[in-house]
Image (cartoon, rainbow, N blue to C red):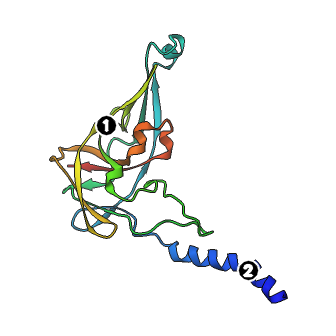
Amino acid sequence: MKNMLVTLLLLPYLVLGQLSTDYKNDQQNGIFFGKANLQLFPTVLGGIQNKNTALAILSFGIVRQSRLPFLSFAQSNHIVAEPQFQFRFQRPLHNEFGFLEPERSFRGAVSPNEFLLLKLTPNTKRNLRYILRQINGWTSRSKAELIPFGFAETQAGIFEVHPFQILERGEYGFVHKDILVSDNFADFMIFDFSVE
């Protein structure tokens, strides 16, 4: 009876420990670029600029407020010569207790169809890049310069991604589509890159 009680008490820890060690190393998930398959690391939001906030409040939404989330620095650290990308969704992410945990940058996505490719607007004077413009008044909408792209699954969980148009010199970034309907931009990470 004592052995059974000890086994029942320890069983959850053994199972959870096994699950967490299976998925601790998650180097397969991510976005990679070029023939060398270099990883495109995500960038965190640098901040949000608010415009016309006081006028929007005083006019009860007749004058619209603009919110402009941005990334720090006018140019990305990732310089891409050939805009060919590979999205890898190899493993689910589990925390140390074994529970499925959505990755902040991938937000539980399983294909590139859940992402957007945005042209970012650099501001060299302020040393930042604007991601999009959210306009709030009686209604709310987001404006962004979207670049269409196609993809094909080459292996299970591995997708080759190609923009449908030639990317001109400038700043770009992949981000989850949820950013267009979100009020909290800080939840998102942008896989940004420069084309030269």
Residue 98: x percent and y percent? Answer: 59, 69
**Image quarter hosting the N terminus:** bottom right
Give percent across and percent down for residue 157. Answer: 34, 67
Q: CA distance from mark 1 to mark 2?
A: 55 Å
Viewed as shown, does residue 182 lie left or right of 3? left
What amino acid is labelled 2 in the image? Leu
Mark linked to residue 10: 2
Question: Which element is circle 1 on?
Answer: strand
Measured along the vertical axis of the image, is residue 167 above or below residue 99? above
Q: Amino acid at mark 1?
A: Pro
Q: Which residue is mark 1?
A: 122
The crowd level at tag 1 (other Cα within 10 Å; few <14, some 14-19, many 20+) is: many
* Residue 181 image point, x, y percent: 43, 37
The quadrant in which residue 27 appears is: bottom left
Label 2 CA crowd tier, 10 Å (few <14, some 14–19, many 20+): few
Which residue is at 63% across, 78% downward? 15
Discs 1, 2 touching: Cβ within 8 Å:
no
Q: Position of residue 65 (x, y in %)?
A: 45, 21
Q: Nearer the viewer, residue 176 or 5?
A: 5
